[in-house]
Image (spheres, rainbow, N blue to C red):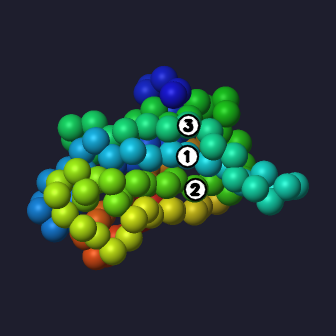
Amino acid sequence: MAAEESSPLTTHVLNTGDGVPGTRMALSLHRLDSNLMIWTMLSVGTTNEDGRCSALISREAFTPGMYKLRFETGAYWESLGQTCFYPYVEVVFTISDPDQRFHLPLLMSRFSYSTYRGS
């Protein structure tokens, strides 16, 4: 994974049902190869005790294009002894200005989720 200080893309997960961070959730970052129309995995990570994953990609590797963050929500809920409706969540987004910073939170419960673009 990229160095935390230089990563232009960060995320955090909040378990809104319990009001706690989504800790130890596996996730992966992908970029769409627009020529082949396939996703290429760029990095994998796990949220920390605060539900954050900060070092997703280096500034140099962050180029304009379409990306997705895949959150392994099913495994997270299973680790808590619970079931959920969504086994994973994929958030697809477009980067046109990679010089900006992007923060992409996932707010979730066992039966719903939402996200937004932070900075």
Identify the element where label 1 is drawn.
Answer: strand
Residue 91 in sight: yes
Residue found at the very far left of the displayed protein: 18
- Residue at the location (50% across, 38% down)? 44
Residue found at the very far right of the displayed protein: 35
Q: CA distance from mark 2 to mark 3?
A: 11 Å
Task: Tell me the kind of residue under disc 3.
Answer: Ser
Which residue position holds label 3? Answer: 43
Q: CA distance from mark 3 to mark 1?
A: 5 Å
* Other residues around mark 3 within 10 Å, as few (<14) / some (14–19) / many (≥20): some
Which residue position holds label 2? Answer: 68
Q: Is residue 97 left or right of residue 82?
A: right
Task: Tell me the kind of residue under disc 2.
Answer: Lys
Question: Is residue 116 placed above or below 54 in the rendered structure?
Answer: below
In the rendered structure, find residue 94 and report the number of the disc placed on it: none
Q: Quadrant of residue 17?
A: bottom left
Identify the element where label 2 is drawn.
Answer: strand
x then y, percent, for residue 117: 45, 60
How many numbered callouts?
3
Question: Is residue 105 placed above or below 85 in the rendered structure?
Answer: above
Query: Is the residue under label 1 in contact with that under label 2 (CB below 8 Å)?
Result: yes
- Residue at the location (28% across, 70% down)? 84
In the rendered structure, find residue 29 and report the number of the disc placed on it: 1
Query: Is the residue under label 1 in contact with that under label 3 (CB below 8 Å)?
Result: yes
x then y, percent, for residue 103: 43, 50
x then y, percent, for residue 107: 30, 63
x then y, percent, for residue 119: 43, 50
Comparing 53 with 71, the one in front is 71
Task: Return the disc, 2 or 1, that comes first in the chain's sequence.
Answer: 1
Identify the element where label 3 is drawn.
Answer: strand
- Residue at the location (45% across, 32% down)? 55
Q: CA distance from mark 2 to mark 1?
A: 6 Å
